[in-house]
Image: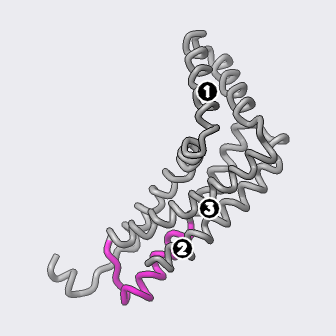
Amino acid sequence: MQKTVLRYGLISGIIAMTLMMITMSFHDKISMAVGWLIGYIGITLSFIVIYPAMVSYRDKVGNGTITFGRSLSIGLLISVVSGLCYVLAWAIIYKTMMPDFLDKFAASSLESMKKAGQSAAKINEAAQEMAVMKERYKNPLWFTAYTIMEPLPVGILISLISALVIRKRNKKQQAAA
């Protein structure tokens, strides 16, 4: 299972890293909202390899069968490996290309809240939360936690769906159920 997880996790991670690098090279030309949309499309595309990984494991290791739990664990572990690659790519981009990202993100978010007619109290509260986030971002553990929380929910969802679809039992298991 380790071989499958590493192989497909790194493939997924390289896809995520490449798409992030391409997207971020245009960050000054697109809005924050469009950047997020493109980013999540890229994240979703990078996790498409989860399903073929499960099929490969089922066919090569499981002799044509795989349980829901085994396939889910493969998908989740691939998501973690890919997510760590995503964190690495973002760390490089953040440090070299976009050290002012959090300032721009905060300004964009607060401006959106103003345009939406949010109260001054809510805007001030959001500004304080963003200041805390900016301070936490200096700590590598917080940086990793914040960053991996972008791709991980997508990976979990794709892993669940793929595990439900791919689950296949042999005839003895089906008769016992």
Q: Are marks 1 and 3 in contact (CB under 8 Å)?
A: no
**Alpha-carbon distance for marks 1 and 3?**
29 Å
Q: Which type of secondary structure does the marked residue at label 1 adopt?
A: helix
Q: Earlier in the sequence, mark 1 or mark 3?
A: 3
Identify the residue under disc 2.
6
Give whichever of discs 1 and 2 has the lower sequence position.
2
What residue is pinned by disc 3? 45
- How packed mark 3 is, by other alpha carbons closer than 10 Å (few <14, some 14-19, many 20 or more), is some
Taking the spot 64% from the left edge, 38% from the top edge, the residue there is: 138
Q: Foreground mark, 3 or 2?
A: 2
* Marks 1 and 2, how far apart at CA: 35 Å
Q: Please identify the dominant SS of the magenta region.
A: helix
Residue type of the residue flagged with mark 1:
Met
Type of colouring: one colour
Span shown in magenta: 48-67
Q: In the rendered image, which quarter is residue 82 located in?
A: bottom right
Q: CA distance from mark 3 to mark 2?
A: 18 Å
Whichever of callouts 3 and 2 sits on the residue coming sooner in the sequence is 2
User: Can you tell which quarter of the image residue 37 is in?
Assistant: top right
Q: Amino acid at mark 2?
A: Leu
Q: Nearer the viewer, mark 1 or mark 3?
A: 1
Left/right placement of residue 51 relative to residue 163 reads: right
Q: How many marks?
A: 3
Residue matched to label 1: 130
Q: Is residue 161 above or below residue 130?
A: below
User: Which residue does the image show at 52% across and 76% down from the upper left?
Assistant: 52
Residue 174 percent coordinates (x, y): 21, 81
Element type at mark 3: helix
Give, as a three-letter code, the residue at label 3. Answer: Leu
Q: Secondary structure at mark 2?
A: helix
